[in-house]
Image (cartoon, rainbow, N blue to C red):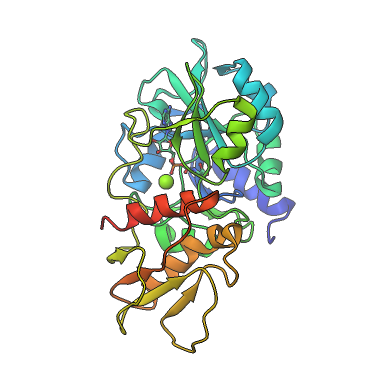
Amino acid sequence: MKSNQSNIKKAKKYLNKNYCIGVPTETVYGLAANAYVDSAVKRIFNLKKRPKNNPLIVHYLDIDSLKRDCLINDNFIKLYKKFSPGPITYILKLKKNSKISKYVTNNGKNLAIRFPNHKIFKELLKQLDYPLAAPSANITTKVSAVQASDVKEEFGNKIKYILDGGKCSVGIESTIINLIGKPTILRLGGLDISKIKNIIGFELNINPKNKVAPGQSRLHYSPGIPLKMNVIKPKNDEAFILIKKRKTKLKNYFYLSTKNNLNEATKNLYSCLRKIKNKGYRSIAVEKISNRGLGKTINDRLQRASRY
Ligand code: TXA
Ligand code: MG
């Protein structure tokens, strides 16, 4: 945790001037700007090369600051009490008099919101009088950033500042739940959906192709080289990703976890993909990962990455 008060002050200075900066969250790093200012929000889209019809998530400190912009409902309150701050994003209706820039939602009437659980990000939000729009801090379709150096790798000198908060503790994007009408899951993520089901009281429909989550496009989370899943025996020259330790000294074996621990594997997934790419491998094979709990999220990302 290299950020201290003076770094937070710097971050604040850039944000107040409507620049974008890198910020740490518990899921992945974000590319943040003032959600109330059109020019600031437009900069995010340009930097990320993001289509303008793909809306952004807005980050708030707490429910009180959110109430200025969104209408809340009972399911939201139940989930908020249990899981926020944390790796869950809610889709709610925007208030008519909300100050959110129309570029955040591409003129849409619904807003994706999240309460990040990272000490430094929370401290920053506490000191601002506006919420922060922030997509994941990667170029569109590429692998998300889970440490400050990854953000630097993605954007170089194009961004003014990165607030360093160490390595992300969850390591994968938030779970997105649409709370307008009957709740549905729009993106699998860092919060296991069986936990959400226990609070909501029924099985949630997973609808990743839903039109309102345009970010879940075919090409996504791509390490830029071909990836194959459920591989038993990799080729000699390809990187092999495993979830439990094997007795071998082969250099092309990369472990997400040594003991089949899905939390650990989630945390290591993106940095592992980035490392393999940077080592110059031309293709990736992944052993079978069980499709339970966070394994579902890992497999979702690997499937998308495999469509390269
Ligand atoms: O963990 C996370 O959610 C990270 C950190 C930085 O908070 N953020 C993140 O943002 O993953 P991004 O922009 O990479 O992904 C947001 C997803 C996109 O698929 C987008 O289409 C969807 O959320 N989304 C945003 N606003 C929406 C809305 N109003 N309705 C439906 N989907 C929305
Ligand atoms: Mg993203």
Nearest the viewer among 212 and 23 is 212
- The picture places residue 219, in percent across and down from the top left corner, at 28, 50
| Residue 40 seen | no
- The picture places residue 259, in percent across and down from the top left corner, at 60, 70
- The picture places residue 150, in percent across and down from the top left corner, at 48, 62
Nearest the viewer among 289 and 1 is 289
Question: Horizontally, is 129 left or right of 171 in the view?
Answer: right
Question: Horizontally, is 299 left or right of 3 in the view?
Answer: left
Nearest the viewer among 301 and 130 is 301
Residue at the extreme bottom: 249
Identify the residue at image location x=65%, y=45%.
Answer: 121
| Residue 289 seen | yes
Picture quadrant where residue 252 is located: bottom left
Picture quadrant where residue 208 is located: top left
**Quadrant showing the N terminus:** bottom right
Vertically, is 225 above or below 280?
A: above
**Quadrant showing the C terminus:** bottom left
Question: Horizontally, is 207 left or right of 33 in the view?
Answer: left
Identify the residue at image location x=66%, y=43%.
Answer: 117
